[in-house]
């Protein structure tokens, strides 16, 4: 059957090269034209877990109390802040920001209500509130209030009074939320049961509508961020300014992705051309592999644009990976073609190309399949960008294999005379033959070295963690890092964590009993009249004088946590209201008056963000200090839940933790499980493919050992260096195995051919090192240096990804040229 397929291939491709090339060009052009629709995505949703119930709860809470869709502009004037000149410049900055169409409001020290400059009473509040823009406001007194206020200190003004923050709040995008709800509601139905044909069509339409609108919204958001920065630049002579907030991080990360795609794609391309020119020294051996690389990448860009598949920060390296993998396939073909000059001297071009394809087709197909399996294993991660990355690479490698065995051989057929490349100084042969001699002379030492390193790897893996600070993902020179650090240090922390506490279920049972009693015609309505006068304070669980102490206990508990920055809650509001109540304790009547009579500005600032409309749910807003040394997210969340239920006696069902802090922690905690699943799937499937290809459990086991070692040693090194797993480094092990196993397959496949020549195991290893070993060396060095280019990124996980993947490939090359060869020599079949 194999011979029949080869004959069909020869008739279709090798004897009709022009037609084959035309078909490839048409296919690449037809798909590549959609590259114009290629999109990037760095939104928070792109980093969330699939079907995360905490994400659903977070969106519901955000809709009730307000979202994280705002920017923070820090402003530190060169002169004193509370001077007419500085406030005038701050006012100009605020007014300019308000001119941006999507900005709904800007909250600054100019706008927030002041109640102690001088002290106001409850009666005064009914007549309106003072702000810094109130005529004849006492600036020194206002400054003192900002520095001591439980609401404003370390939030809107730093402790030293030199830096203030402006919160730029974007208008609520109802269209976006409506499209999101439509998509999610249909998706949730699909999780519970099979969708009907009509529902499936509706879901696809909803997804497309949401994707299209999100893309337009992302573009507009980037323009808004650029406008904000331009406005900030107009004030830099008067003050030092930094920009922070989730929309800014998203916009900047998209810029990082765009930079990485362009810079590293071009960098790897230039490097590959240089390497090919240095190794092969013939134009055709540079041009043809690069044509294959170009066709593969253009096809994938077009395909992603066609299916509207967005590239995230995780998948931004797909260009470099696809270039490297495509080149690896071509290099093995070039090296094999060159070997044929000695094996079949004087052969014509058709014979040379046909034999090259015949001898390399099977191992290349298996290497491509194993690499596809490695990337496909990422589908088990549960993290959307990692899943998408796996699909992208699986599709890209499939096309790279097709291109390599159509475009490359067909192009060679256009050259009538075979051309061999010659080595001026065979340094590659020196290196590979040295490895063979090492194995021959120091086999036992080699085994001991690898055994010792394996122990080191296992111990290192046991030290791996997933806890990392988000701020550490960026270089200190980036505005993301600088803005987060300043807000962390001076303005109460960066990462939002919300504690939601519901009313006790017994409270609702009591309400139902009271409702039933009200239906009794003989019931006394005296207490009903009293409750009516008390308003919300008489009908709600939280908004009453009995719960003030409980609210304060929870607030104080959260405030004393080492990682807590600014904590705001209804307890903060109660403290302020007690101040305007002449420091007298608040009773239910006072609370009812406050709730009914306070101006809208006070209600919007002090009540709605922390208390549900029915008074039966409260929200504690915590800003976590991301730069806290030794921050452990999962341990902190467990501690809060435990302390609230055990020490403060809340029922577990009352307590809910949400916010970006929780969602990011969920992603991190899933990485351990994801890593185990990924590696497990990779090794099981690759082991099965080895058994299928080599039809020998011995050879399959030998082949898997060097790849286990290289992946394990790199993970162990990360553990020893205290480098945590993240959404980028989690892919290192699978990618290492998927790429490194290519060389293993080529080596073992060649070994099985060489051993049949004379049955000399050592001689077969030496011949393999001197033939396929060269291709392994070329591809490995190319991959190692190619990945190292990623160290120039601004995104720290990308740097780690590039360096550790390159290191893993170096270890894999050494293991294949030493340990693999040694095991093939020593672990022989019984009849050998």
Image (spheres, rainbow, N blue to C red):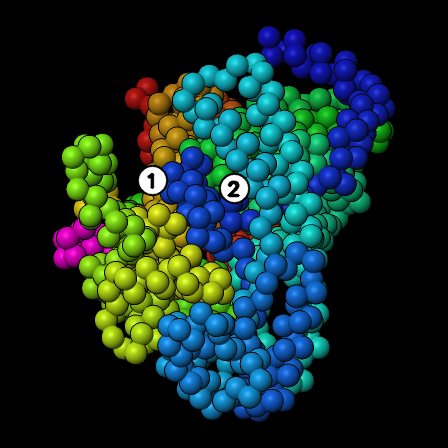
**Range covered by the magenta-colored residues:** 640-650
Can the viewer see residue 628?
no
Q: Is residue 505 above or below residue 208?
A: below
Looking at the image, which is closer to me, 684 or 304? Answer: 304
Can the viewer see residue 613?
yes
Q: Indicate whether residue 748 is drawn in magenta.
A: no
Looking at the image, which is closer to me, 612 or 486? Answer: 612
Total of numbered circles in the picture? 2
On the image, the x and y values in percent for residue 345 come to 72, 28
Quadrant holding the C terminus: top left
On the image, the x and y values in percent for residue 327 come to 65, 40
Q: Quadrant of residue 37?
A: top right
| SS at circle 2 | helix
How many C-alpha atoms fall within 10 Å of the one at disc 1: few (<14), some, or many (≥20)?
Answer: few
Q: Main secondary structure of the magenta part?
A: helix
Residue pictured at 56% horizontal, 81% vertical: 134
Q: Is residue 780 above or below residue 308?
A: below
* Marks 1 and 2, the one that precedes in the sequence: 2
The residue wearing badge 2 is: 385
Q: Is residue 797 above or below residue 199?
A: below
Does residue 717 appear left or right of residue 293 in this picture?
A: left
On the image, the x and y values in percent for residue 359 come to 61, 24
Residue 673's disc is 1
Q: Are marks 1 and 2 in contact (CB under 8 Å)?
A: no
Q: Quadrant of residue 362?
A: top right
């Amino acid at each position: 059957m194999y011979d029949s397929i080869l004959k069909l291939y020869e008739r279709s491709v090798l004897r009709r090269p022009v037609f084959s090339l035309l078909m490839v060009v048409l296919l690449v052009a037809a798909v590549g034209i959609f590259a114009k629709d290629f999109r990037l995505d760095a939104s928070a949703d792109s980093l969330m877990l699939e079907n995360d119930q905490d994400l659903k709860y977070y969106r519901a809470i955000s809709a009730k109390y307000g979202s994280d869709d705002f920017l923070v502009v820090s402003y530190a004037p060169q002169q004193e802040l509370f001077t007419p000149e500085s406030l005038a410049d701050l006012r100009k900055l605020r007014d300019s920001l308000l001119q941006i169409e999507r900005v709904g409001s800007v909250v600054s020290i100019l706008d927030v209500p002041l109640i102690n400059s001088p002290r106001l009473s409850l009666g005064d509040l009914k007549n309106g509130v003072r702000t810094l823009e109130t005529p004849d406001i006492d600036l020194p007194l206002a400054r003192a209030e900002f520095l001591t206020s439980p609401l404003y200190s370390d939030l809107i003004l730093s402790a030293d009074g030199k830096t203030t923050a402006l919160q730029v709040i974007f208008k609520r995008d109802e269209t976006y939320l409506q499209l999101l709800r439509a998509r999610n509601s249909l998706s949730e139905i699909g999780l519970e049961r099979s969708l009907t044909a009509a529902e499936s069509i509706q879901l696809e339409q909803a997804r497309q509508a949401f994707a299209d609108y999100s893309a337009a919204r992302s573009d507009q958001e980037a323009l808004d961020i650029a406008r904000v920065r331009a406005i900030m630049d107009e004030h830099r002579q008067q003050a030092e300014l930094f920009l922070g907030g989730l929309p800014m991080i998203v916009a900047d990360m998209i810029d990082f992705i765009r930079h990485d795609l362009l810079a590293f794609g071009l960098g790897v391309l230039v490097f590959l051309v240089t390497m090919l020119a240095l190794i092969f020294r013939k134009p055709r051996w540079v041009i043809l592999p690069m044509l294959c690389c170009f066709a593969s990448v253009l096809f994938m860009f077009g395909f992603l644009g066609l299916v509207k598949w967005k590239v995230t920060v995780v998948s931004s390296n797909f260009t470099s990976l696809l270039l490297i993998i495509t080149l690896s396939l071509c290099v093995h073909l070039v090296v094999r073609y060159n070997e044929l000059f000695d094996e079949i001297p004087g052969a014509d071009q058709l014979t040379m190309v046909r034999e090259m394809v015949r001898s390399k087709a099977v191992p290349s197909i298996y290497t491509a399949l194993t690499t596809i399996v490695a990337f496909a294993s990422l589908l088990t991660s549960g993290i959307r960008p990692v899943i998408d990355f796996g699909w992208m690479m699986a599709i890209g490698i499939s096309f790279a294999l097709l291109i390599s065995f159509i475009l490359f051989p067909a192009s060679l057929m256009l050259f009538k005379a075979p051309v061999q490349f010659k080595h001026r100084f065979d340094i590659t042969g020196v290196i590979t033959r040295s490895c063979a001699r090492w194995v021959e002379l120091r086999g036992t030492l080699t085994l001991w070295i690898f055994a010792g390193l394996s122990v080191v790897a296992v111990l290192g893996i046991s030290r791996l963690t997933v806890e990392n600070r988000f701020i550490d993902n960026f270089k200190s020179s980036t505005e993301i890092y600088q803005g987060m650090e300043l807000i962390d240090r001076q303005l109460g922390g960066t990462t939002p964590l919300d504690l939601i506490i519901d009313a006790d279920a017994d409270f609702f049972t009591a309400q139902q009993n009271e409702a039933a009693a009200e239906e009794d015609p003989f019931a006394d309505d005296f207490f009903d009249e009293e409750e009516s006068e008390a308003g919300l304070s008489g009908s709600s669980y939280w908004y009453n004088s009995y719960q003030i102490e409980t609210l304060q206990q929870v607030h104080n508990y959260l405030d004393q946590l080492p990682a807590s920055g600014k904590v705001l809650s209804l307890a903060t509001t109660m403290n302020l209201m007690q101040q305007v109540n002449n420091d007298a304790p608040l009773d239910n009547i006072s609370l009812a008056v406050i709730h009914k009579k306070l101006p809208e500005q006070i209600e919007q600032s002090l009540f709605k963000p922390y208390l549900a409309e029915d008074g039966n749910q409260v929200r504690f807003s915590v800003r976590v200090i991301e730069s806290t040394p030794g921050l452990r997210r999962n341990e902190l969340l467990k501690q809060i839940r435990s302390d609230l239920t055990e020490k403060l006696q809340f029922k577990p069902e009352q307590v809910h933790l949400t916010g970006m802090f929780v969602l990011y922690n969920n992603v991190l905690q899933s990485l351990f499980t994801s890593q185990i699943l990924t590696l497990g799937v990779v090794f099981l499937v690759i082991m099965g493919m080895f058994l299928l290809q080599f039809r020998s459990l011995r050879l399959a086991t030998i082949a898997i050992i060097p790849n286990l070692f290289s992946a394990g040693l790199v993970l162990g090194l990360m553990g020893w260096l205290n480098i945590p797993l993240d959404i980028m480094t989690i892919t290192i092990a699978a990618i290492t195995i998927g790429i490194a196993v290519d060389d293993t397959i080529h080596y073992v496949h060649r070994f099985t051919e060489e051993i049949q020549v004379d049955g000399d195991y050592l001689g077969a290893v030496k011949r393999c090192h001197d033939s396929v070993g060269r291709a392994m060396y070329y591809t490995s060095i190319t991959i190692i240096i190619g990945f190292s280019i990623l160290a120039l990124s601004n995104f720290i996980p990308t740097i780690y990804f590039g360096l550790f993947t390159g290191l893993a490939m170096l270890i894999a090359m050494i293991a294949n040229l030493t340990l693999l060869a040694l095991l093939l020599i020593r672990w022989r079949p019984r009849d050998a």
